[in-house]
Image (spheres, rainbow, N blue to C red):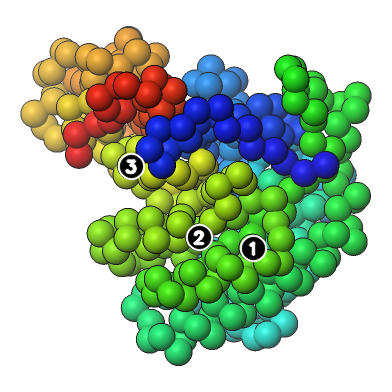
Amino acid sequence: MSIQLQIEATRGSGRAGKLITPHGEVETPVFMPVGTLASVKGVSQDVLEELGVEILLANTYHLFLRPGVETVRQMGGLHRFMSWDRAILTDSGGFQVFSLNDLRKVSEEGVAFRSHLDGSSHFLSPEKATEVQIGLGADIIMAFDECTEYPADRARVRASMELTVRWAERCKNYFAAHKHEVPWEVSGQWPVVRGQYPVPSTQSLFGIVQGGMDTELRRESAERTIAIGFPGYAIGGLSVGEPRELTHEIVLSTLEHLPTDQPRYLMGVGTPEEIAQYAQSGVDMMDCVLPTRAARHGLLFTSEGKVSIKQARYAQDDSALDPACDCRVCQRYSRAYLRHLYAANELLAQVLNTVHNLHFYLATMRAVRAWIRAGDATGAGVSRM
């Protein structure tokens, strides 16, 4: 049995419900914090649970290089390795390989690349990327795709899209033959989902729609990927340097061609305001490194807009970072203290900033879900950016 999406309420194009996974129910639309190396930088798993995180994203490329899939497999998979019994999604590594630029060479068979860690040579094919993700044991795994650079001419975008479609079929074929090798079992190891829904008994492989910034190629990619057949579909290849207005246009046009009864996942995109807009437009799942990366650079999201806590004007500001926020940081610490920690290069600055930003993103999604379920509310309560 594959993963299931239970849609419980709609408002306009937005929908709210539950994603049923082997490791628990996930309220949708959902924001997934990025835990690249099986860790959300600076935040322990108990704090993530306290924040209400129901699903995390981990990265195949990085875990493939370190500690290696066999280490994770022998430890019982990512859930047991990182002591996390809620849902996990792994991306395929395609975007990270794309980011290597001169360190990679793409062919029909896959991608040869050199490690950013030590320069060692490696190769990821659709089959290998799928094998690695099966070994990692995430609840949701992604087909191996090629992310098209921006800008790119139409011939280049078409060739890349065609390659991604061919790779998607190879991923599905490999997954069908090897999905039983996942290093965990639902029965007896992890809590089953409470409620009326049956528990999925295996991983789920999602397809990815590519096509650059060309709406017609995006439509074709969606139709051909759907024809291959996956339990969920992602919109990939965005936030690669294009204007945000163009990102928005491509997302909305692509959503029109995706099934309405299956999960729709927008990869790697979003300020708080943007993820709220995409959730209201019918996206079910989103991830982005922005809340954690911005936190490490002292950029914090609040109900009153962005705050650069490094600025000297906060040195004697005794007020809470965001008076409207109920996170553990805003309830306890002043802007002056947070500014001091950052200026002093204290590790605690990164931890507290990250906890707040994650809370803000998760609270934004809770507000959107409430807005969809209410049906007659006036807005989703997102930040002013």
Report the quarter where the N terminus lies: top right
Which residue type does callout 1 highlight? Answer: Ile
Q: Which residue is mark 2?
A: 257
CB-based contact (under 8 Å), mark 2 and mark 1: yes
List x then y, in percent, for residue 25.
66, 27
Q: How many marks?
A: 3
Left or right: residue 344 versus residue 223 is left
Residue depicted at 54% across the width and 80% down the height:
160
List x then y, in percent, for residue 132.
77, 58
Q: Nearer the viewer, residue 176 or 319?
A: 176
Q: CA distance from mark 2 to mark 3?
A: 18 Å
Q: Viewer-nearest of labels 2 and 3? A: 2
List x then y, in percent, for residue 369.
44, 27
Q: Is residue 13 above or below residue 144?
A: above
Q: Is residue 96 above or below residue 84?
A: below
* Sequence-wise first label, 2 or 3: 2
List x then y, in percent, for residue 120.
67, 73
Residue depicted at 53% across the width and 73% down the height:
220
Element at label 3: helix
* Sequence-wise first label, 3 or 1: 1
Residue 355 appears in the rendering: no
Q: Which residue is mark 3?
A: 277
Q: Which residue is mark 1?
A: 226
Q: Quadrant of residue 117?
A: bottom right
Q: Nearer the viewer, residue 173 or 127?
A: 173
Q: Quadrant of residue 333?
A: top left
Element at label 1: helix
